[in-house]
Image: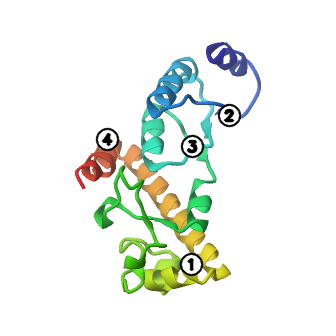
Amino acid sequence: LRIQSSKFVLGLPFEGIAIGGSMGKTKKEMYKILDWIIKIVKDDERPIHLLGIGWIDDIFEAVERGIDTFDCVEMTRIARHGELYISPQQGGNIKNKFRISIRKSIFSKDNKKIDRKCDCYTCKNYKRKNLHLMYRKKDKKYARLATIHNIHFMLSLMKKIRDSIKSEKFKELKEKWLNHSQSS
């Protein structure tokens, strides 16, 4: 049905092609489904959009397969629940989903930025200990600051991905993020 649907959508005058719905029960199944669809739509000039996928490793895998754009609530949802993105240089990896949990008491005295490479408003103005305390006190400002960080982090990563594609260094960037982080 996905193959049939993909062929049908190619015949319609949309400005882009969206892929969504159930993508299987595992990442392996999702990548297999994407591979089926991409074989059909890859020669079309329109951008390909993947709905609801937002984990960093999935973004790298999807970009490598030909996906152009994404949307997902992941960044804002995890922010509200105390999860903040960090780069591999800060200890982010596939196992911890490139995140720290600011809820943990280890951050109550942590004077570091969320991620030292990040230049978002939150990282410029708040330390991990401040965010930990706000989260614990259920301060409404916490959710806004965490969301600012996570969205900025993801936008910065997407810029790095675009730049790496333009400079033909995508595989190196993917390796830096996914393989470096597996050994962390």
First in residue order: circle 2 vs circle 3: 2
Q: Which residue is mark 3?
A: 53
Marks 2 and 1, the one that precedes in the sequence: 2
Does residue 113 lie above or below 11 as drawn? below
Residue, disc 1: 135
Q: Residues within 10 Å of mark 4 (few under 14, many from 20)?
A: some
Residue 6 is at least partly visible in this image: yes
* x then y, percent, for residue 98: 40, 57
Q: Mark 3: which amino acid? A: Ile
**Looking at the image, how many numbered discs can be counted on the residues?**
4
> What residue sits right under mark 2 in the picture?
16
Disc assigned to residue 171: 4
Q: Are marks 2 and 4 in contact (CB under 8 Å)?
A: no
Q: Earlier in the sequence, mark 4 or mark 3?
A: 3
Q: Tell me the CA gap for discs 4 and 3.
A: 20 Å
Please give left or right for residue 6 compared with residue 90 in the image: right
Q: Residues within 10 Å of mark 2 (few under 14, many from 20)?
A: some
Label 3: few (<14), some or many (≥20) within 10 Å?
some
Residue found at x 56% / y 72%: 146
In the displayed structure, 22 sits above or below 1; it is below
